[in-house]
Amino acid sequence: MLYLYLDESGDLGFDFFSKKPSHFFTVTILAVKGIENNRAVLGAVRKTIKRKLPRGSRMELKGSDTVLEIKKYFYNQVSEIPFEIYALSLNKKRVYSELAQKKDRVYNFIARNVLDKISFDDASTRIEFIIDMSKSKREIKEFNDYVTRNLKGRIDPRVPLDIYHHTSHENRGLQAVDLFSWGIFRKYERGETKWFEIFKNKIKYDDRYL
């Protein structure tokens, strides 16, 4: 069983004059092989929330809101679990103006490039691909079709590929990848690396596009 959790950090706004969008847009995938390893990652999120977040607060780990000490606590729970992180950060200022109007296409392209770096050779039973719910029904269908079409030749046809779109509040795997995605994004966006340095040994691929 292969579990893939995808989240993004930053935004896809391109109006750098009248608004203040992020300079980078990062797509990150957390890849976990095996039911037990996946259960351990989800358990670490649950344990961190239970022990470290104040009661009455929003019971969710978010990269942008969670303080470094809590992130460290979470990582201590998962540091011995085998998993891999893949990420690609788009330098938005170098995107062609005509392409900047097609945000869905940009998102799908970056996500596909991250997926291209993941090996599916050992995926022999089932693949679950979980994405943060941020799209309309039309966009979800287009994304699912795009991903399925591009992965078809890389996955054994006998191995089912299930794609789910969940909110991070209801899926602890998405909360885990959100923490890692934020650390990678901030490295490019602000040059902040304190959190990144803690988990960087788990990164299999991290690059900048454009």
Image (cartoon, rainbow, N blue to C red):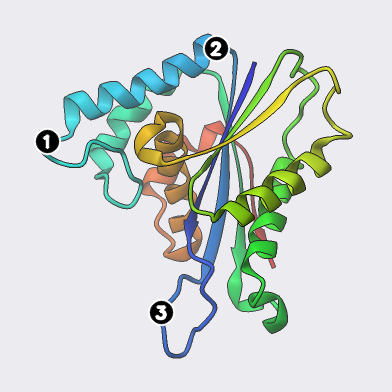
The local secondary structure at tag 1 comes to loop
Disc 2 crowd rating (10 Å Cα; few below 14, some 14-19, many 20+) is few
Name the amino acid, label 1: Pro
- Disc 2 marks which residue? 35
Q: Residue at x 34, y 27 (%)?
A: 45
**Kind of residue sitting beneath label 2:** Ile
State the residue at coordinates (49%, 84%). 16
Residue that protrudes farthest toward the front in the picture: 137
Position of residue 161 measured from the top left corner of the image (x, y, whole percent)? 71, 27
Tell me what residue is drawn at x 41 percent, y 51 percent. Answer: 193
Q: Quadrant of the C terminus?
A: bottom right
x, y percent for residue 39? 45, 15
Identity of the residue drawn at 43% across and 48% down: 183
Disc marking residue 204: none
Q: Nearer the viewer, residue 36 or 164?
A: 164
Q: Is residue 15 above or below residue 140?
A: below
Badge 1 crowding class, 10 Å Cα cut-off, few under 14, some 14 to 19, many 20 or more, is few
Rendered location of residue 118, percent (x, y): 72, 34
Give residue 20's mark.
3
Return the residue nearer the eye: 189 or 15: 15
Left or right of 51 on screen, residue 165: right
What amino acid is found at the position of numbered circle 3 in the picture? Answer: Lys
Residue tagged 1:
54
